[in-house]
Image: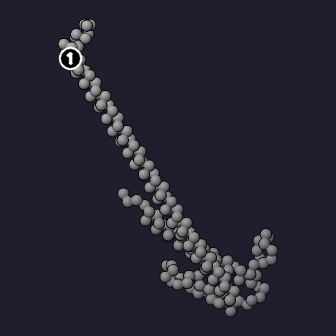
Amino acid sequence: MSWLTRFLISNWSLALVPIVLLCVWLSGVWVGAGRTQRAWDAERHQAELAQARAQQKIADIKRSQEQINHEISNEFNQRSVQLAADLQSGGFVRMRSSPADGVGGVPAVPATSDAVAPAASNSVPVASRDEGTMSCERLGEDAAKATLMLVELQKWVQEMGALVRVKEPSH
């Protein structure tokens, strides 16, 4: 037998201790690497969840804004049709259908006044790009539509402000 074999047989505990320590060290490295990998995976998963929540919140806000815009557009179109019908009938025109719709309702305004004669004296010259003249009736229609647009725009701004206040996270 060789001297190395004789030495290992006589001093087996000296040879076994480094082997046991090496095994313990390797198992520690293996377990530690697994724990580190799981921790990294969990952190990456949390980051992905946070990103998905943020994207969902953005999608919800966009969907809410589109729904509000659609509702306001439909309401504006309905009121424009009603306004045009009221102007055609020569009756009284109300911009808001009830005082509960807004802060203050616009009072009824007659479509035409009895004090002004419906003669050519009420025609107003317009820019050279338009042909002919614009009548007071047309100006009244345009003013009524502009007022309706302004009221709807104010309503939209209020709803967007309320939506943003509702969607903001609390700290």
Measured from the top left, where is residue 39 in percent x and y? 35, 42
* Side of 86 where 155 appears, left or right: left
Q: Which residue lies furthest to the front in this view?
A: 1
Q: Nearer the viewer, residue 74 or 34?
A: 34
Q: Which of 25 and 88 is in front in this view?
A: 25
Q: In this view, does 92 lie above or below 101?
A: below
Q: Which residue is drawn at 23% across and 17% down?
A: 15
Q: Which amino acid does label 1 sit on?
A: Trp
Q: Nearer the viewer, residue 99 or 74?
A: 74
Q: Which residue is drawn at 44% across and 55% down?
A: 53
Screen quadrant of the N terminus: top left
Mark 1: few, some, or many residues within 10 Å (few <14, many ≥20)? few
Measured from the top left, where is residue 150 in percent x and y? 58, 73
Q: Is residue 69 above or below residue 141?
A: above
Q: Nearer the viewer, residue 15 or 168?
A: 15
Q: What element carries label 1?
A: helix
Q: Which residue is drawn at 73% across and 90% down?
A: 117
* Side of 161 where 153 appears, left or right: right
Q: Residue furthest bottom?
A: 114
* Residue assigned mark 1: 12
Measured from the top left, where is residue 148 in percent x and y? 60, 77
* Side of 6 where 137 appears, left or right: right
Is residue 154 visible to the viewer in this orientation of the structure? no
Measured from the top left, where is residue 90 in percent x and y? 68, 89
